[in-house]
């Protein structure tokens, strides 16, 4: 029964992006092991995301009272915000097993049919990166989600027959970093859609305090505030920076994570006070210094920093956009005024800066606190 399942939590597929791992929102292989130790196990332990968490609590409670599996749940949002954690929490809140797989792992609809027919009544099936599921498997999923039934097709061509197969009532939990790539019919079959938001600094501090307790790290409030402020609104990054700072504290200091220790460690790891790392800064410098603030195409920008355009586009830019430092416009990438300030450079005289008469600005969200307004998926994985 375990055969068709992928139990390794292969949620985040590291696309070979070359960024230094410190502030990447994607988890590496070793990190997944550490992460499972830090995962919250119940909704009350789950920090932040007040909206999703309260709505989900109602959905689960209602289902429990009716004695029926809850509606199918879709969790969408950038990597590292707690989608996998929530999927596992749904299982434990319901007291049912969670079977885990991912979109890319389901190559043939037969694989999915086998998984579905192996489910026990009430089980949770978690499909991570569900937008990457192959089309025939997706079509099979429609009927399974709606009628708890799958048609297994036997044979090919005109002689092929569909044998209907009953499956146990189950709850599908899908996670996606690219809700926009989901087809309409699939999205419509989820009764509950939870949109995960980036975390506030105070919430990340709570995450850090909890992780520090679990890891046995002595973390001061100033230390956690410093780390939280550089974590890009992402618990996964906060936890990772905590581990790096802990190493530094143990080797270079007395093990205690104070403000000074956190600052020194993060400087050593090239994570600046906004959470930008070396590559982010290189991109920003190139844009501001070499291209006078833009607009410039992403490919040109990538060449200037010696990186793949994909890396610049999927790893650096979403955060730079969210931080209000860079805007994607129809004519190319443009630096905002804040970019000059952040790099400590004087604004160009009379330059057509963002917010000026330039027009053509479509990608600017302005406020970093409204990432949802960005036209493209943030921290795309
Ligand atoms: N709300 C939260 N409270 C506490 N820790 C969290 C929370 N969200 C995420 N984390 C931590 O961040 C790590 C990454 O979360 P995960 O659920 O794998 O994110 P995603 O699946 O969205 O990429 C987890 O190991 C967990 O320790
Ligand atoms: Mg995940």
Image (cartoon, helix red, strand yellow):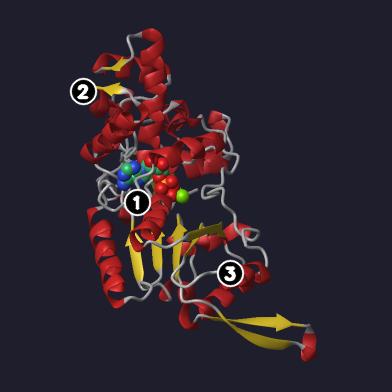
| Distance between the alpha carbons at the discs numbered 1 and 3 | 51 Å
* Neighbours of disc 2 within 10 Å: few (<14), some (14-19), many (20+): some
Q: Residue at x 31, y 29 (%)?
A: 212
Q: Earlier in the sequence, mark 1 or mark 3?
A: 3
Q: Are marks 2 and 1 in contact (CB under 8 Å)?
A: no
In depth, the one of 214 and 266 nearer the eye is: 214
Q: Residue at x 28, y 28 (%)?
A: 341
At mark 2, the secondary structure is: helix
Give the image location of residue 376, x and y in percent: 42, 54
Q: Residue at x 29, y 77 (%)?
A: 66
Q: Are marks 1 and 3 in contact (CB under 8 Å)?
A: no
Q: Nearer the viewer, mark 2 or mark 1?
A: 2
Give the image location of residue 128, x and y in percent: 50, 57
Using the rendered image of the protein, determine whether residue 319 is visible from the camera's viewpoint. no
Q: Earlier in the sequence, mark 2 or mark 1?
A: 2
Q: Is residue 229 left or right of residue 80?
A: left
Report which residue position mark 3 lands on.
118
Question: Tag on residue 361?
Answer: 1
Q: Is residue 153 above or below residue 60?
A: below
Residue sitting at the far bottom: 158
Q: Is residue 203 left or right of residue 81?
A: left
Q: How many marks?
A: 3
In depth, the one of 306 and 178 nearer the eye is: 178
Give the image location of residue 313, x and y in percent: 49, 44
In depth, the one of 201 and 293 nearer the eye is: 201
Q: Are marks 3 and 2 in contact (CB under 8 Å)?
A: no
At mark 1, the secondary structure is: loop
Report which residue position mark 2 lands on.
222
Q: Quadrant of residue 106?
A: bottom right
Q: Quadrant of residue 177?
A: bottom left
Q: Residue at x 29, y 48 (%)?
A: 46
Q: Nearer the viewer, mark 3 or mark 2?
A: 3
């Amino acid at each position: 029964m375990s055969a068709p399942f992928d139990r390794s939590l292969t949620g985040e597929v590291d696309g070979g992006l070359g960024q230094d791992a410190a502030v990447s929102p994607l988890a590496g292989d070793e990190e997944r092991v550490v992460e499972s130790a830090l995962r919250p196990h119940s909704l009350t332990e789950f920090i932040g995301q007040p909206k999703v968490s309260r709505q989900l609590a109602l959905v689960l409670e209602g289902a429990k009272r009716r004695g029926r599996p809850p509606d199918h749940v879709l969790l969408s949002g950038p990597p590292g915000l707690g989608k996998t954690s929530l999927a596992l929490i749904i299982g434990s809140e319901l007291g049912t097993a969670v079977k885990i797989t991912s979109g890319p792992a389901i190559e043939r609809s037969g694989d999915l049919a086998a998984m579905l027919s192996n489910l026990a009544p009430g089980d949770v099936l978690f499909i991570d990166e569900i937008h990457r599921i192959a089309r025939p498997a997706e079509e099979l999923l429609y009927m399974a989600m709606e009628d708890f039934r799958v048609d297994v097709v036997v044979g090919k061509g005109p002689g092929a027959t569909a044998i209907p197969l009953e499956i146990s009532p189950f709850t599908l939990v899908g996670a996606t970093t690219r809700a926009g790539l989901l087809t309409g019919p699939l999205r419509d079959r989820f009764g509950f859609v939870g949109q995960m938001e980036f975390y506030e600094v105070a919430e990340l501090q709570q995450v850090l305090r909890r992780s520090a307790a679990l890891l046995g790290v002595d973390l001061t409030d100033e230390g956690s505030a410093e780390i939280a402020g550089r974590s890009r609104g992402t618990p996964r990054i906060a936890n990772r920076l905590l581990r790096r700072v802990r190493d530094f504290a143990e080797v270079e200091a007395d093990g205690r994570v104070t403000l000074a220790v956190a600052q020194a460690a993060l400087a050593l790891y090239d994570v600046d006070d906004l959470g930008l790392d070396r590559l982010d800064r290189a991109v920003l410098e190139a844009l501001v210094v070499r291209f006078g603030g833009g607009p410039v195409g992403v490919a040109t920008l990538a060449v200037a920093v010696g990186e793949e355009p994909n890396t610049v586009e999927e790893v650096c830019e979403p955060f730079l956009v969210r931080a209000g430092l860079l805007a994607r416009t129809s004519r190319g990438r443009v630096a905002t005024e804040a970019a000059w300030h952040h790099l400590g450079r004087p604004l160009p005289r009379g330059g057509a800066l963002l917010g000026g008469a330039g027009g053509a600005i479509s990608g600017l969200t302005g406020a970093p606190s409204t990432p949802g307004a960005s036209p493209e998926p943030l921290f795309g994985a």
